[in-house]
Amino acid sequence: MIGIERGFAMGTREGHARPTIKDIAKAAGVGVVTVSRALNDKPEVSETTRAKVLAVAEKMGYRPNRHARLLKLSHNPAVALVVKGIDNLFFQQMLDTMETRVRERNYLLTLVKVPHWADEVEEAIKFVDEELIAGVIFLGGSFSHEAYAFERLHAPFVMSTVSRLNKVPDALYSSVSVDDAFEAEKAVRHLIELGHTRIAVLGVPSTDVSVGAQRVTGYRHALAHAGIPVDEDLIRFEVLDQGNPYTLQYGYELAKKLLAERPEVTAIFAIADVLAIGAMRAIREAGLKVPENISLVGFDGLPLGDFMDPQLTTLAQPAQQIARLTCDLLFDQIASGPSRHVFVPGTLHRGGSTGPVRTIR
């Protein structure tokens, strides 16, 4: 890779009057991968199918575009990295690994920042021209997209840190993430095993479509499996119009209000480490101690947590592994390989912020 471009993509995507390989695939009754292989004279296609695809392509007036020439002739085709929440500390520790992985394949990397409230797929469609972009990595984002949205994105793509999309066919893309609900349940179960039953969660509204909602689901599952009734008032969140819930301030405000209204709480699960670190300040300001009065567990495994006092107990995601797998799966997609959906395991990193119930207030 020659360099990494940072900033917002500018301009809009023009409509494509000419047929795409997806149009040919639909008309020929075959898959997109088959069309790509036939048009590029790959050996994995039978001669009968190749002839059919070429005939349909000719009839539809298809002509190879500069995207194909770019991949064949340029030493530096481009990969777009669409980051939803560039200030997310967990994402930031993945960028160098992705940059290195992309450079090893002699690709350029274009970094595009998308606000938390925006639709990352629509943002990608604005700038991803199939003549220029070989593939797309979505780092963060929503898991509720419809298939038709991606049909307008004329490039292979991988969802990173976002699990499989329920409404999008698996064969259309690849994904790499932890199982957010399962790992969150593991984190809350740690608190339950320490004897806590009055456990709050600093989370997001039920209408949220980010991984935060899945982590709240994991919280619910942990309580249910332990036979602890779910108190809806202990699921704390604020409805933000265009704000970002993954911030220190958000965690601080939620915890401050929680401690004032529900002083009997003995443990808190935060859906992200930054929320947990923000909550630490609110706990100290309330004259309480971690973990003597309040046990606290986060989610992500940020290195910053190790420098807190006490060290933060957190469900750590393997950031570097996710970053490497994401790039590898994208290049498999670019090479017309099969799509893959990979869950990588998280690890409970036990710091000093959790302990058994000691003081009942």
Image: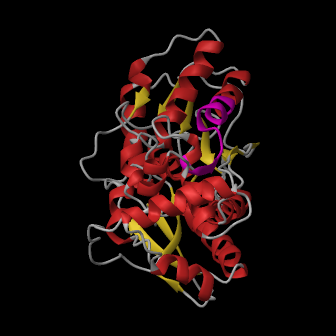
Residue 83 visible, this orientation: no
The picture places residue 206, in percent across and down from the top left corner, at 38, 30
Extent of the magenta region: 172-186
The picture places residue 295, in percent across and down from the top left corner, at 62, 35
The reply, left or right, for residue 175 in relation to residue 275 is right
Residue 261 visible, this orientation: yes
Which residue lies at the image location 71% right of the left edge and 29% below the top edge? 190
Instruction: In this rendered view, identify the residue nearer to me: 77 or 90.
Output: 77
Q: Quadrant of residue 299?
A: top right
180 part of magenta stretch: yes
The residue sitting at the left extreme is 241
Applied colour scheme: secondary structure
Vertical position of residue 237 compared to residue 156: above or below: above
Callout count: 0
Instruction: In this rendered view, identify the residue nearer to me: 23 or 195.
Output: 23
129 part of magenta stretch: no
Q: Quadrant of residue 125?
A: bottom left
Vertical position of residue 359 compared to residue 287: above or below: above
The reply, left or right, for residue 153 in relation to residue 216 is left
Query: In which quadrant will I find the N terminus?
Result: bottom right
The picture places residue 12, in percent across and down from the top left corner, at 26, 72
The picture places residue 82, in percent across and down from the top left corner, at 46, 65
